[in-house]
Each structure stands twice: as structure tokens, then as C-alpha cells.
Image: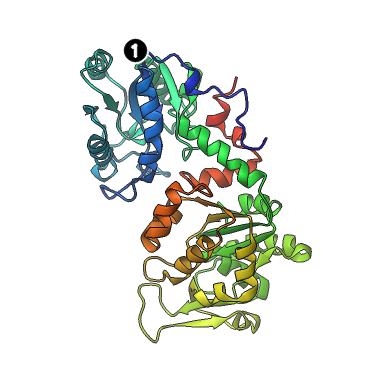
């Protein structure tokens, strides 16, 4: 992946003739939880693409997924109002001087939306005639065919293709190949949106970093992180772990039982420990916060402990945060302070009750004014915004800071060696 360049085979929306054409835009507006917008960043980040489409005379039809309405065991789809696109449409209506139509279709109580029926035809005509500025389709995962593998999926892809002339994928955070991110690209002239392009270009700072390169990754389980972590390990000069994956790392390294750490995670952590045996890239945080309970923060039931407690091999309670003192240790502080590239996909503590470790981490990273600072992941950006609002707002416009809209996508691209090995992106290559 060349520095800062897009693969010449990638079809770009700037190259498309959009005048008067209905443009199905797959966005990643997965920002709604319990009927409210958690953070509007992903919506804001997509506005450039929408303005660009409108400037070229395109007529946008938007689609996003929200949450996980499909039951993995039964396959049933429950279309809850709390996972509707309604709040997103309201937000866009306040931001854009246009009339937006939120389309609805009949819902089967177990199978979700079976088909895109003819009720949409009228609104597409109004869109092309200029009486509507935008159409927003229902949550893509409400459609029976979106995550299916059979004829329902083929039918949905065909129906989506029938409502538009052009397809634009701007959903960097939606890397899994579903009907609305992958299959549709085989049925219409398809292009990469401006945001998707921007995300791919900024990924080169992870693939070809200025050194020293420090990565901070935290998470709840190794099963989704171990592959990317092993790939990332080979790229970094130093790796800092947080959350349950750090607890499992310490538990496995020192043979200590830690409450909440599974044997499966300990086993996966041993793979990293073995990798690190000679290179010593993984930095230990010398102080963590141990708590007797996970339900709350009660004085006398939590305490700061040092790594030596793990080395003693005794059983420990729940480890729920990094003690900020860890980040003031000269060695670790100097490593982050002298880094030239810092990648962060990390919330260090159990939020919102144990937040000090995350806040200290973000402030330390922000104090490095010479590094490229790359933040990825919805939770990471949400907590950066909540805990350090001034740093977050400064980063929005700072030339040395970038916020990826999809943390999981970044990690998956790292694991696969290139963003062009993600199926939805691959589908946009000549």
C-alpha cells in the first residue's frame, strides 16, 4: 500500500456521472442506541460525500445498519423502534436544508421486512423530480435478505438494484460482506464514496508508520482481537494492552487467577506472550485497579495494586481499570511522548464507573504534539469525547489527528494486510 495513495483500480464517486440519477448510498450511521444517537460523528463524517453527490446532480437514497436485530440462533429478526433510522433522519433534517422521506415497509413479526415493495416507486419519482431531497431506507438488518445466504439475499440485492442507477459505498465501518455492502456492487455501477476513500488513505499511517510506532488496544475478549493483535504486533515498536485482554495477558504470563478471565482468553493470550518472549514489545502497565465487585464503585471495595501482586501467583478479584500512575511512570511516559505514530483502539476501564485510566491515557497521547494520532472505534471516540471534550474537538480539525469511523474495520484490514482485501472494498475494484 503506497503512502497516501489509493489503488488505481478503485472506482471513485468523483468519476461517476450522477446527473439526475438515483444513487443508493450505503453509509455507516450505526450510531443509535435505545432510540437515541450516541455520537453524531459518523453522520457528520459522511456529509462530505452527500454534498458531493448533490453537487453532481445525484439523488441520494441512504441505507445503514443499526444494532443486531437478528437472533443468531433462530434467525428471527425483531424490528424494534429503538433500532430504527428515525433519530438519524431527524438529525439530518436539522443539518440539511432538504426534505427527507423515511421509507417504511410491512414487517413480518419473525422475518422482518420481506421485500422492497412498489410503495417506494412514488417517492423515487419525487426524488428525481426534485420534490424530495433524500430518501432514507429502513435499517438494512431489518430486511430478511441482508444477512441471509439463500434466495432471500439474492432477492434483496436485486430489489435494491432496481431502485437506483448508481451504488456508492461510503460505509467504512461495515466491512462484512452483506447484501447492501457487497452483493449490490455486482448489480449496479459501483463507486467508493469520499469518506471511504479518506479512511483508506489514512490507513497508510498504520501500514507504513513513522517510527517509533506505538499502538494501544483494549477489549473485552481475545476471540475478535487476537488475529489483528498478532498482525499489529509485527508492525509496532511498542504495544500497550488494556481492558480484559490485558487482564488475561497478565493472568497467563504470571499464572495468576483473575476474576472474570476465561481459560479460553488465557490460552489465546499465551500466543502473544510467546511472540513477545524475544522482542519485548508489549509494555506492562505497573499499576491496575482491583475491585471486589463489578456492579459499582464502593469505597473500601476497590484498590490500586502493583504488578508484583500478579507475580506472587495469588488469586485476584476483578481488574477494572489502569491506575493513572502507570501512565506517569518515566519509561512508559517517555515511550508515548517520543512516538511518531500512535494508534488507539482502547477504553482502559469499565465505563462509566472506572474512567481515570482512559482519561489519563488520552491526555498523555494528546500531549505528544509531534506524533500522528490515530483513534479508531466507536467506544474509543465516545469516551474521548466524554472524558476530554477539548482534546476531542481539537482533534476534529488537527492536521496530525484522524478519527476512523470503524475500529473493527481498521483491525480487520490490519489482519488481512490491506483494506483492499475487505470484500466490500474489493467489490469496488476494476
Q: Nearer the viewer, residue 131 or 121?
A: 131
Above or below, 236 against 361 in this view is: above
Location of mark 1 (residue)? 20
Q: Is residue 218 left or right of residue 379?
A: right
Colour scheme of the rendered structure: rainbow
Q: Is residue 404 left or right of residue 85?
A: right
Query: Would you identify the image quadrant in which residue 68 lies?
Result: top left
**Quadrant in which the C terminus appears:** top right
Image position, residue 348 (x, y; %):
49, 65
Badge 1: residue crowd in 10 Å (few <14, some 14–19, many ≥20): some
Q: Classify the position of the N terminus by image quarter.
A: top right
Question: How far from the left and from the top, in percent, is residue 339?
Answer: 63, 59
How many marks the image carries: the answer is: 1
Extreme-bottom residue of the structure: 300
Residue 407 at what x, y percent from top left? Answer: 50, 48
Residue at horizontal 26 percent and vertical 23 percent from the top: 133
User: Image height check: is 342 above or below 183?
Assistant: below
Residue 248 percent coordinates (x, y): 58, 67
User: As displayed, is residue 18 above or below residue 25?
Assistant: above
Q: Nearer the viewer, residue 21 or 194?
A: 194
Q: Is residue 283 left or right of residue 319?
A: right
Amino acid at each position: 500500500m503506497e503512502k497516501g495513495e489509493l489503488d488505481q483500480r478503485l472506482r471513485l464517486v468523483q468519476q461517476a456521472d450522477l446527473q439526475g440519477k438515483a444513487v443508493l448510498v450505503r453509509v455507516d450511521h450505526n450510531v443509535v442506541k435505545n432510540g437515541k444517537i450516541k455520537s453524531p460523528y459518523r453522520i457528520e463524517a459522511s456529509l462530505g460525500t452527500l454534498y458531493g453527490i448533490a453537487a453532481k446532480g445525484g439523488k441520494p437514497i441512504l441505507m445503514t445498519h443499526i444494532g443486531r436485530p437478528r437472533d443468531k440462533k433462530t434467525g428471527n429478526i425483531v424490528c424494534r423502534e429503538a433500532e430504527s433510522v428515525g433519530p438519524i433522519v431527524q438529525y439530518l433534517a436539522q443539518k440539511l436544508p432538504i426534505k427527507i422521506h423515511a421509507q417504511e415497509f410491512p414487517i413480518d413479526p419473525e422475518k422482518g421486512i420481506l421485500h422492497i415493495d412498489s410503495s417506494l416507486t412514488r417517492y423515487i419519482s419525487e426524488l428525481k423530480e426534485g420534490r424530495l431531497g433524500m430518501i432514507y431506507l429502513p435499517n438494512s438488518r431489518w430486511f430478511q435478505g441482508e444477512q441471509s445466504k439463500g434466495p432471500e439475499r439474492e432477492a434483496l440485492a436485486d430489489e435494491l438494484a432496481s431502485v437506483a442507477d448508481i451504488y456508492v459505498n461510503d460505509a467504512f465501518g461495515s466491512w462484512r460482506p452483506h447484501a447492501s455492502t457487497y452483493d449490490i456492487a455486482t448489480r449496479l455501477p459501483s463507486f467508493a464514496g469520499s469518506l471511504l476513500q479518506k479512511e483508506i488513505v489514512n490507513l497508510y499511517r498504520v501500514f507504513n508508520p513513522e517510527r517509533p510506532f506505538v499502538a494501544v488496544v483494549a477489549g473485552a475478549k481475545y476471540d475478535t482481537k487476537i488475529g489483528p493483535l498478532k498482525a499489529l504486533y509485527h508492525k509496532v515498536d511498542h504495544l500497550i494492552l488494556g481492558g480484559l485482554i490485558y487482564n488475561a495477558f497478565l493472568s497467563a504470563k504470571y499464572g495468576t487467577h483473575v476474576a472474570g478471565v476465561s481459560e479460553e482468553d488465557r490460552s489465546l493470550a499465551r500466543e502473544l506472550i510467546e511472540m513477545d518472549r524475544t522482542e519485548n514489545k508489549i509494555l506492562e502497565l505497573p499499576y491496575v485497579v482491583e475491585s471486589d465487585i463489578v456492579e459499582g464503585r464502593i469505597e473500601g471495595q476497590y484498590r490500586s495494586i502493583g504488578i508484583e501482586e500478579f507475580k506472587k501467583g495469588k488469586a485476584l478479584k476483578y481488574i477494572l481499570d489502569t491506575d493513572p500512575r502507570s501512565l506517569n511512570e518515566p519509561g512508559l511516559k517517555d515511550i508515548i511522548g517520543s512516538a511518531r505514530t500512535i494508534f488507539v483502539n482502547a477504553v482502559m476501564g469499565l465505563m462509566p464507573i472506572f474512567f481515570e485510566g482512559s482519561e489519563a491515557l488520552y491526555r498523555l497521547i494528546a500531549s505528544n504534539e509531534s506524533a500522528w494520532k490515530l483513534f479508531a472505534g466507536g467506544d474509543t471516540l465516545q469516551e474521548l469525547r466524554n472524558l476530554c471534550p477539548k482534546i476531542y474537538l481539537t482533534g476534529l480539525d488537527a492536521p496530525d489527528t484522524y478519527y476512523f469511523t470503524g475500529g473493527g474495520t481498521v483491525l480487520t484490514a490490519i489482519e488481512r494486510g490491506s483494506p483492499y482485501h475487505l470484500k466490500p472494498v474489493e467489490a469496488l475494484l476494476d
